[in-house]
Image (cartoon, rainbow, N blue to C red):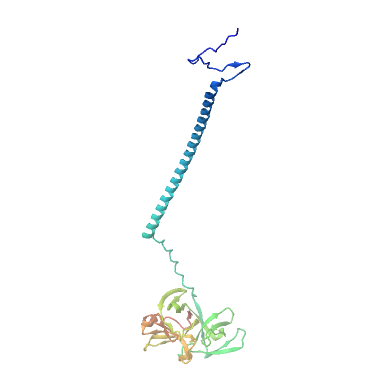
């Protein structure tokens, strides 16, 4: 007779077997244990799902917290930067930084060059024929051997490159006229002085041997009676100390562009003037006016034929 056997080991106090019974070649769960096992398995699955969900939630929460911290940090930094920028803007408005130093002024331009010496031709005879070119003809003018004051006629040489001839400036109209004279009709000498007048600056520069010796403040022609610009020379000199003139007069080789009824046909000049209040202004009839003391320094120093350049 077959006998029921039980596995060795612990079993509950009741008489219910702790393990399923074998039927043939497999195992089966007794009906009364199926429900508790199903419930236990369900609980296990639910617990695993809960644990996984909690883990995911924790990770998500950790990531969200990190992102929140980063955003807060960026906001704090932006706010701090904005505050600092605003404060700096306020400080700049209240206490503007000093302006950068101005660049150094350029050095004054050197004075224009002047010739160290000039060649002057003095007429020998009572008159000298003037030719259009150094070929011997035609004769375009005759220049007297002396000026209206009886001083020997002096002509400024502009070209001495042709043997036997000199090209000279002529003290006639129009201003700037030149011509050729035979070398045999003149004697020549060298002058070291040169005068330059800057009309816009009301300044006369006296050069000697090519260097500025002294500068003087002058008056020049009024707008209606302007001083002519161009290259001239001292044609005649005269002591003249009668008001309104002072000390003397240099008559130049040039003429006023507007006056014909002036002595010498509107000849222009440089002279002393007693009223020094007009210096530095356009006040004359076309001559260059100097203070009495200034013109006295030139009167008996500057020889006839000295070049005079008048610029705007």
Lateral position of residue 28 relative to residue 302, left or right? right
Of 166 and 61, the residue lying toward us: 61
Residue 29 x/y as whole percent: 57, 20
Lateral position of residue 183 relative to residue 203, left or right? right
Residue 204 x/y as whole percent: 43, 78
Of 184 and 197, the residue lying toward us: 197
Please say if 40 is above or below 293.
above
Q: Looking at the image, which residue sits at the far top? A: 1
The N terminus, quarter of image: top right
At x 49%, y 76%, the residue is 117
At x 43%, y 50%, the residue is 78
Of 196 and 305, the residue lying toward us: 196
Please say if 168 is above or below 103.
below
Number of labelled discs? 0
Residue 2 x/y as whole percent: 60, 8
Of 176 and 182, the residue lying toward us: 176
> Quadrant of the rendered structure where residue 88 is?
bottom left
Q: Looking at the image, which residue sits at the far right? A: 25
Lateral position of residue 28 relative to residue 271, left or right? right
Residue 99 x/y as whole percent: 40, 61
């Amino acid at each position: 007779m077959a006998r029921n056997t039980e596995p060795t080991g612990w079993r509950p106090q009741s008489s219910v077997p702790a393990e399923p019974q074998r039927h043939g070649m497999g195992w089966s769960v007794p009906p009364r244990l199926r429900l508790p096992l199903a419930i236990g398995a369900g609980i296990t699955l639910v617990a695993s799902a809960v644990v996984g969900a909690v883990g995911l939630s924790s990770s998500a929460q950790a990531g969200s917290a990190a992102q929140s911290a980063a955003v807060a940090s960026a906001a704090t930094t932006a706010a701090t930067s904005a505050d600092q920028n605003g404060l700096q803007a306020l400080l700049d408005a209240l206490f503007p930084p000093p302006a950068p130093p101005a660049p150094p002024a350029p050095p004054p331009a050197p004075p224009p060059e002047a010739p160290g010496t000039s060649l002057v031709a003095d007429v020998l005879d009572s008159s000298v024929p003037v030719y259009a070119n150094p070929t011997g003809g035609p004769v375009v003018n005759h220049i007297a051997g002396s000026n209206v004051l009886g001083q020997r006629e002096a002509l400024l040489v502009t070209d001495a490159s042709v043997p036997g001839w000199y090209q000279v400036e002529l003290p006639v109209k129009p201003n700037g006229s030149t011509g050729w004279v035979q070398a045999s009709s003149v004697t020549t000498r060298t002058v070291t002085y040169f005068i330059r007048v800057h009309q816009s600056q009301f300044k006369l520069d006296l050069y000697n041997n090519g260097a500025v010796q002294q500068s003087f403040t002058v008056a020049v022609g009024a707008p209606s009676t302007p001083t002519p610009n161009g290259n001239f020379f001292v044609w005649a000199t005269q002591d003249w100390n009668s008001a309104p003139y002072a000390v003397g007069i240099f008559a130049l080789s040039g003429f006023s562009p507007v006056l014909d009824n002036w002595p010498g046909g509107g000849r222009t000049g440089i002279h002393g003037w007693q009223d020094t209040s007009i210096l530095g202004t356009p006040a004359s009839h076309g001559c260059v006016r100097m203070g009495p003391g200034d013109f006295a320094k030139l009167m008996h120093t500057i020889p006839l034929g000295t070049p005079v350049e008048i610029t705007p």
